[in-house]
Image (spheres, rainbow, N blue to C red):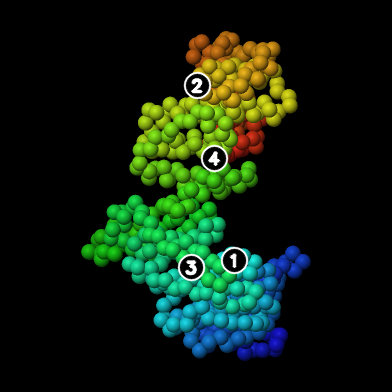
Amino acid sequence: MFDSPVRHHNEFIRIASLDFVFTHILKYENGLAVYGIICCHLNNVLTFWSTKLEKSLFLAENDFHNSSIRHIKWFQITDELSWLLVFLGNGQVYVYEICNYPHVQNSFSLWLDEDFACVKNILLQNISNNQCLILFTKMAYVVIILYSLTEKKIVSTKREMIPKTAIIPGFTFIKDKQLLILVTDVGKFVCMYLSTTESEVNYTINIVSHNFNDKVKYFTCNSVVFSKNQCMCALTFQCNMPRYSKNDGHVRNKVVLCTIPENLVELESKILLVNNYNYGDVIDCIETLRINKINDKSNELYEVDRSWLDKCPIQNLKLIYWKIVFKSKKNEQDETILQELQMLLHVRFLTSNCNEKKKIKNEEQYYYRIMLSNYSQKLPAEYILVKTDAAKFIRSFTQADHTYFCTTCEQMILTFTDYTMFICEFEHKELRCPVTLGPLGIPYLVCSMCFTMANVTAKNQSCVWCFGKYIPNKLLH
Ligand SMILES: [Zn+2]
Ligand SMILES: [Zn+2]
């Protein structure tokens, strides 16, 4: 069985005529990756190899089917179990279960019709320890298969034809919601809510309308890419109209970026759940939020509930702040609310900073006292908790004293109520750090998300205004 390729010259002859090669990581041996390589030959024979350190070992060969093999795909189902999916030229799809590579221990078919159509999308999703879903699309069909890993058999198959589409260019599956989102060839979203039992899979269908109908009237959607956080996708469209002349140099294809409507609710909770090391995901989410707000035509007014804001966690406060920041058309009321939220965020930041730090320098205590007193006067009376918190630190910093002189004219600076800059009576300006409230020395830091600046002592601290953290400013290095 495990013949050496050196002895079998025939193998090399066949490899010369191979159609395609498929590689996947099999396992790690002493930290080195062992690759499984499957070569597909023109005579529909697959040869299996294992490769470590650029040395390939021939393992086995298998004549898979009478029809030509169009494509193969390797899926790791569990730690022990892998599936080799074989897509044939006649449209049939087979699964070969492999526990001990390359030996096939079980096989079954996913699609038996000889329709000569290819599978456009396929996804495998474990939904419990003993069940997995196989989802794929073919022409206008979506096929949902429930497979029992313990019984090693298909327990339920559902086939649904999506109306008014020739193909399904793309789909995604949101596991928590058991929601399958399909995109049709006119760019319409179709949601399928799945429900599974031990022996069956059922679903309800909901067609979601989108707001870019007009933009893609004479176009056909041919591919869809979903973002990592599943909140956003890019749809590519190809023009249906024939070119009129050789000189017609107009771009005929377009890409539409859009948020996935059903998933927006999750977006907010994802932002709120962020831990400090996962900025990529948050930036992705914030970007989606931004695009969503730009497209938002509704003129909803934000209702200020101050007693709620007074108690709400700082992350939620930041989210509300950003939601309003991103509104494309801000009215006067939005601007007022933004100013109020900005003050609120800064007070919350300063007081939590005091709570966390054991030792605060004298000058910092002084700046904090002045700033907190100023904010306390400006904030409406409903912010009871926030004001009580501020009052506590204003009291404990009463002894702190400090004088600061203008760097340009050396005059003493008299007011410290603008957190963005020190301004002397001759209007000389100097930047301030929102974290220490002291001068902003160079090299300063910038927030990884909103690019506001901070002093070097704030390194790796979370940003006052958003979900980013202060990191060295690359432009200065
Ligand atoms: Zn000055
Ligand atoms: Zn920021």
The nearer-to-camera label among 3 and 4 is: 3
Q: Can residue 430 be seen in the rendering of this structure?
A: no
- Please, is residue 329 above or below residue 239 in the view? above
- Between discs 2 and 1, the one toward the N terminus: 1
Q: Tell me the tag on residue 449.
A: 4
Q: Which mark identifies residue 380?
A: 2
**Residue 84, image x and y in percent?**
58, 76
Determine whether, in the image, residue 339 is placed left or right of residue 127.
left
The secondary element bearing badge 3 is classed as: strand
Residue situated in front as seen by the camera: 201 or 422: 201
Q: Mark 3–mark 2 contact, CB under 8 Å?
A: no
Give the side of residue 179 with respect to residue 400, left or right.
Answer: left
Chain-order first, disc 1 or disc 4: 1
Q: Which mark is drawn over residue 202? A: 3
| Amino acid beneath label 2 | Pro
Secondary-structure class at tag 4? loop
The residue under the point 52% across, 74% down is: 156
- Name the front one of labels 4 and 2: 2
Q: Nearer the viewer, mark 3 or mark 2?
A: 3
Q: Are marks 2 and 1 in contact (CB under 8 Å)?
A: no
- Is there CB contact under 8 Å for labels 4 and 2? no
Give the Cα distance between marks 3 and 2.
Answer: 53 Å
Say what amino acid the circle numbered 4 marks: Met
Q: Amino acid at mark 3?
A: Asn
Do callouts 3 and 1 mark residues in contact (Cβ within 8 Å)? no
Report x, y in % for residue 440.
59, 25
Apparent side of residue 164 relative to residue 77 in the rendered image (left or right): left
- Identity of the amino acid at label 1? Asn
